[in-house]
Each structure stands twice: as structure tokens, then as C-alpha cells.
């Protein structure tokens, strides 16, 4: 199981929804693992896009510290489009202290 973050990119859309100008993608190998980390990082559901979350730069640093793999934006776009398994038995979630 792996957690991934993309390099930061600029979002110019709605400043009410995206108050931070630079974001990155957070995604994982399974849906359960993605939701686990989203809750761990305190992410809002409005930042969820099903297979990935938008992640602010300060949380990106924490995700990398917790073991997330940094990928380039091309790889991120490819990986975040793949369907995620939903079976909790497939996810061996890490234990953080």
C-alpha cells in the first residue's frame, strides 16, 4: 500500500473553495487508505474528488514526513485516474503515533 503526493500546482478557480493558491494531489492505492489518511490529516470532504484529494502545501509536507511518495504531476494524473479497490481487507493501514 502506498500514499502519494504530487508536486504543487496553481489553482485559479473559485477562491471561496480554494483559498490557498497552490495545491497538490493526495492519492493512495486503495480507497480505504485514502480516506484513512484524509481523516488523519483533517481534510475537508469538499476537497475530495473520489480517487484523490486536493492537499494544501503545509499538509503535503506532513504527508511526505509520514511516508508519502512524491511523484511528478504527469504520473499523478495517470495514477489518480485509476479505479481504487474499496475492500477494507485489501488495505493494511499504518499505525501512526
Image (tube, rainbow, N blue to C red):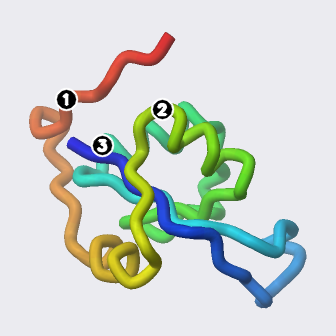
Q: Is residue 57 above or below residue 13?
A: above
- Residue receiving disc 3: 32
The residue lying at 82 percent from left, 85 percent from top is: 14
Residue 89 falls in image quadrant: top left
Judge left or right: residue 41 versus residue 33: right
Q: Residues within 10 Å of mark 1 (few under 14, many from 20)?
A: few
Discs 3, 2 touching: Cβ within 8 Å: no
Q: Secondary structure at mark 1?
A: loop
Image coordinates for residue 68, horizontal then vertical, percent = 42, 45
- Residue receiving disc 1: 92
Judge left or right: residue 43 versus residue 53: right
Gap in angstroms between the C-alphas marked 1 and 2: 15 Å
Q: Is residue 46 above or below residue 43?
A: below
Discs 3, 1 touching: Cβ within 8 Å: no
Does label 3 or label 2 sit earlier along the sequence? 3
Q: Secondary structure at mark 3?
A: helix
Gap in angstroms between the C-alphas marked 3 and 2: 17 Å
Amino acid at each position: 500500500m502506498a500514499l502519494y503526493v504530487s508536486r504543487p500546482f496553481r489553482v485559479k478557480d473559485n477562491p471561496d473553495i480554494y483559498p490557498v493558491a497552490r495545491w497538490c494531489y493526495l492519492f493512495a492505492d486503495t480507497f480505504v487508505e485514502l480516506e484513512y489518511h484524509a481523516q488523519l490529516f483533517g481534510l475537508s470532504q469538499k476537497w475530495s474528488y473520489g480517487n484523490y484529494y486536493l492537499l494544501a502545501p503545509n499538509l503535503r509536507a506532513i504527508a511526505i514526513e509520514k511516508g508519502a511518495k512524491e511523484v511528478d504531476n504527469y504520473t499523478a494524473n495517470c495514477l489518480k485516474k485509476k479505479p481504487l479497490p474499496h475492500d477494507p481487507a485489501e488495505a493494511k493501514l499504518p499505525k501512526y503515533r
